[in-house]
Structures are given as structure tokens and as C-alpha cells.
Image (cartoon, helix red, strand yellow):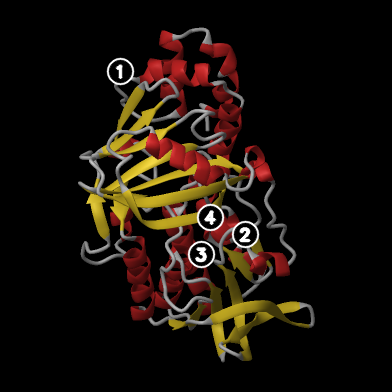
């Protein structure tokens, strides 16, 4: 039961880390507390088509629908349409997430990783103050899984990170509570993923409609925890569905509830322990989407682990190259979007309507903070004062 690396969690972040580490010769074990990979589904099931560039999936059976882009609706109904390549990391494909996760796990196993289901991490192992593995409950047995590197891919408010001394608890203002139905028998033919903004619709968040076919769609909502109370997300979601022709006759075939971080990334390396995915808050603070971030970070983590195993060095110095790989790309975007999130939270619905009015007919050459500012201020100069904090971001 001795491995180069033990990864806690078989979601996309864990499986992609496992795959790239195993391909470089590492002896990898993934443990998963559930009895099946990908179940239950825990997200809106949207991902950018940029995922194709990573060559980590075979075939197309994981794709429920291919989208042309996104439509964003302001509180007064003004629509802004974006093509898929400019619509963010959640728009491109609508997934069968359970199949998607299983395909990622299959890729990791094919590369040489081992997977243990029904295995729940209960603590980290330490010897002379150094982490040397994971203590786990496998069915009814307590087992010790020794490893040179431990990876926490165990989701929001990571327990693995907490056991290692990393502060993983989120503030209510950095957490979205979410609810989602998969509705059947709807009347919806759209080539776009739809997002709806407004304090009355979703305080501090948004509602979404992701078509999975002409009569099936994921319809969900995210509400900032600091602006919510028990049951509010579901109550607002039901209200949203009833008010939308085409959705209000639908019948649910699945209901999901959960939470996602909308915070800045945290310390992802401590000694010989690494955090990836939601565990490291590698999630877009504006949208709450984390699949593409998990892909990018997982690849960087796996490659770093592979190099560490090759050199037989398991200290923070070599493992920190994982964060260095994503600092100027992924982390730059996430930190910038956290600032944008904080600005948007302070805006009234009237301001959001003005933003949408500025953008509804704008033809973007590129989607950048600077191009966005130019579009907004050109039509509504009064927005300049409210958007002044964004000027600093235009150089990021």
C-alpha cells in the first residue's frame, strides 16, 4: 500500500492529475468515497470547447449538446449575445457529466493509475511531522495508504487541506449555494446557453438554462450564501421556472443542490501536499464554473508530480512549480475575475441594465477588460465613475 502519490477525490481535478502523473511514470492511487465515479452529478454540466485542445477524452458520448455561444439577460430582459469562443469557460458543450467523469477516470486508469471506490479519507498520516500518506476507511476497514505526495482533490472546503493546516473554510460572501433541475418536456430550441441576472432573480448570482436537447435542459440558480437563507435557492428557482414560457410545463427528472466557491485561489502547496480543483478554489469567481480550471490545474499538477518522482524530490521547492505554471495564466484570470465579482455585487439592477444596453449590439474583436470598458463607456459615459476600479484590471 505504498505509492508515489495518493489522490483524494475522483472528480475531474483528481483524475486529470492522476493521468498526467501516471503517464510520466508515477505510481498513482485515486481514492473515492462514493461507490461510483461521476455520481451524483454536482454541476451545471457546461464546459468550453477548449477542452478538446487537451486531448484527454475519446469519442463524443460525453457530449449532450454543442452550443453556439451564450446569451446574457439583464434584469430588464436586455440580451447580450456572445459566440462560444468569447462566452467563457462554461459555454461550448453541455455534458453528460457522469459519463464525462467516467471517461476522465478511464483515461487515468489507462495511463496506469489505480482507483479504489468506497474509500473515504479520514485523516493524513504523519511521521516525524512530515505527511507520508492518507488514513482511510475502505468499507469497514481502516487502512494506511503511504505516499511521498498527497493530493487533495476533495472539493469545496477541502478536509485534506484542513488536516494539513491550510485554511480552507470559505466566507459566506465567497460561496454560492446552488440548486438545479434537469427538466424534460420543455419547449425550448436554442443553440445558446442562457444566463439571467438580477437581485430579484438570484441575489449575488444568476440563473441558467443549459439545453441538453430540444425538450430537455438543465435549469439552475446560484445565490451568494451571504445573501441567502435555507431553502431560498430552490424557492427562487421554482419562481424562475414558473415565469418562463417553455420551461413552466416541464417536469423534473433530476434535482441537485450544492455549493461552489467564488473566491480567490488559496495556498495550493504545503510541503509535500498539493490541492487541485475546487479544493484550491480554482473556480471562476464570476460564474462559479470550475471544469476548465480543473483541467488546466490538474495537468500542471500531474506534470509537476511526474518530475518530482523522476528526481525523487518531494519538497515544497519542487512542488511549487505547479503553482508557478498556472500563476500567469489561470491564476491571473481568477484573481482578476474576483475583483470584477466584488464590483458587480455592489451594482444595482439599473446599472446592470445599462451595462447590457451598452453591449447588446457591440461587435467584439476580443473579449478583454479593456475592450469591455470601451464598449460600456462609449454608450453610457456615466458608467465611467462606477467602473473606475476596472481600469486597473485592463492591464492585467
Vertical comparison of 140 with 285: above or below: below
Give the distance between the C-alpha atoms of the residues marked 4 and 1, in whole angstroms: 35 Å
What residue did someone put label 4 on? Answer: 258
Q: Examine the image and state in which quarter residue 145 appears.
A: bottom right
Q: Residue at position x 43%, y 50% from top?
A: 180
Q: Earlier in the sequence, mark 2 or mark 4?
A: 4
What residue did someone put label 3 on? Answer: 301
Q: Are marks 1 and 2 in contact (CB under 8 Å)?
A: no
Q: Which labelled disc corresponds to residue 305?
A: none
Give the distance between the C-alpha atoms of the residues marked 4 and 3, in whole angstroms: 26 Å
Q: Are marks 3 and 1 in contact (CB under 8 Å)?
A: no
* Callout 2: SS: loop
Residue 91 lies left or right of residue 35; in this view the side is left
Q: Earlier in the sequence, mark 3 or mark 2?
A: 2
Q: Earlier in the sequence, mark 3 or mark 1?
A: 3
Residue 227 position within the rendered picture, expressed as x and y whole percent measured from the top left: 64, 37
Q: Earlier in the sequence, mark 4 or mark 3?
A: 4
What residue did someone put label 2 on? Answer: 268
Q: Is residue 12 visible?
A: yes
* Callout 4: SS: strand
Q: Nearer the viewer, mark 4 or mark 1?
A: 4
Q: Dividing the image into 4 quarters, which one contains the N terminus?
A: bottom right
What residue did someone put label 1 on? Answer: 361
Residue 54 position within the rendered picture, expressed as x and y whole percent measured from the top left: 33, 59
Residue 160 position within the rendered picture, expressed as x and y whole percent measured from the top left: 65, 69
Q: Nearer the viewer, mark 3 or mark 1?
A: 1
Q: Earlier in the sequence, mark 4 or mark 1?
A: 4
Amino acid at each position: 500500500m505504498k505509492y508515489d502519490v495518493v489522490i483524494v477525490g475522483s472528480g475531474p481535478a483528481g483524475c486529470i492529475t492522476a493521468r498526467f502523473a501516471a503517464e510520466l511514470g508515477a505510481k498513482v492511487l485515486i481514492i473515492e468515497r462514493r461507490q461510483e465515479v461521476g455520481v451524483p452529478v454536482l454541476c451545471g454540466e457546461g464546459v468550453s470547447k477548449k477542452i478538446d485542445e487537451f486531448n484527454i477524452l475519446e469519442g463524443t458520448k460525453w457530449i449532450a449538446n454543442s452550443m453556439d455561444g451564450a446569451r446574457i439577460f439583464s434584469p430588464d430582459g436586455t440580451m447580450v449575445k456572445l459566440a462560444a469562443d468569447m462566452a467563457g469557460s462554461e459555454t461550448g458543450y453541455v455534458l453528460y457529466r457522469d459519463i464525462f467523469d467516467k471517461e476522465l477516470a478511464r483515461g487515468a486508469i489507462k495511463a496506469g493509475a489505480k482507483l479504489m471506490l468506497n474509500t473515504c479519507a479520514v485523516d493524513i498520516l504523519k511521521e516525524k511531522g512530515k505527511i507520508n500518506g492518507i488514513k482511510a476507511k475502505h468499507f469497514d476497514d481502516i487502512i494506511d495508504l503511504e505516499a511521498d505526495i498527497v493530493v487533495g482533490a476533495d472539493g469545496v472546503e477541502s478536509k485534506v487541506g484542513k488536516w494539513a493546516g491550510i485554511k480552507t473554510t470559505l466566507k459566506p460572501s465567497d460561496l454560492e449555494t446552488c440548486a438545479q433541475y434537469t427538466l424534460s418536456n420543455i419547449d425550448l430550441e436554442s443553440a445558446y446557453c442562457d444566463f439571467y441576472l438580477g437581485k430579484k432573480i438570484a441575489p449575488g448570482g444568476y440563473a441558467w438554462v443549459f439545453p441538453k436537447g430540444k425538450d430537455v435542459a438543465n435549469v439552475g440558480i446560484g445565490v451568494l450564501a451571504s445573501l441567502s437563507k435555507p431553502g431560498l435557492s430552490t424557492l427562487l428557482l421554482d419562481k424562475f421556472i414558473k415565469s418562463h414560457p417553455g420551461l413552466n410545463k416541464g417536469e423534473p427528472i433530476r434535482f441537485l443542490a450544492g455549493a461552489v466557491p467564488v473566491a480567490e485561489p488559496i495556498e495550493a502547496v504545503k510541503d509535500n501536499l498539493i490541492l487541485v480543483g475546487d479544493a484550491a478554489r480554482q473556480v471562476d469567481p464570476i460564474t462559479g464554473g470550475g471544469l476548465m480550471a480543473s483541467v488546466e490545474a490538474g495537468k500542471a499538477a500531474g506534470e509537476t508530480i511526474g518530475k518530482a518522482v523522476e528526481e525523487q524530490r518531494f519538497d515544497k521547492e519542487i512542488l511549487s512549480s505547479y503553482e508557478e505554471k498556472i500563476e500567469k495564466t489561470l491564476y491571473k484570470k481568477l484573481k482578476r475575475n474576483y475583483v470584477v465579482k466584488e464590483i458587480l455585487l455592489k451594482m444595482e439592477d439599473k446599472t446592470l441594465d445599462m451595462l447590457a444596453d451598452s453591449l447588446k449590439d457591440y461587435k467584439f474583436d476580443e473579449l478583454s477588460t479593456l475592450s469591455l470598458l470601451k464598449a460600456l463607456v462609449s454608450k453610457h459615459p456615466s458608467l465611467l465613475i462606477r467602473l473606475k476600479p476596472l481600469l486597473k484590471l485592463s492591464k492585467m
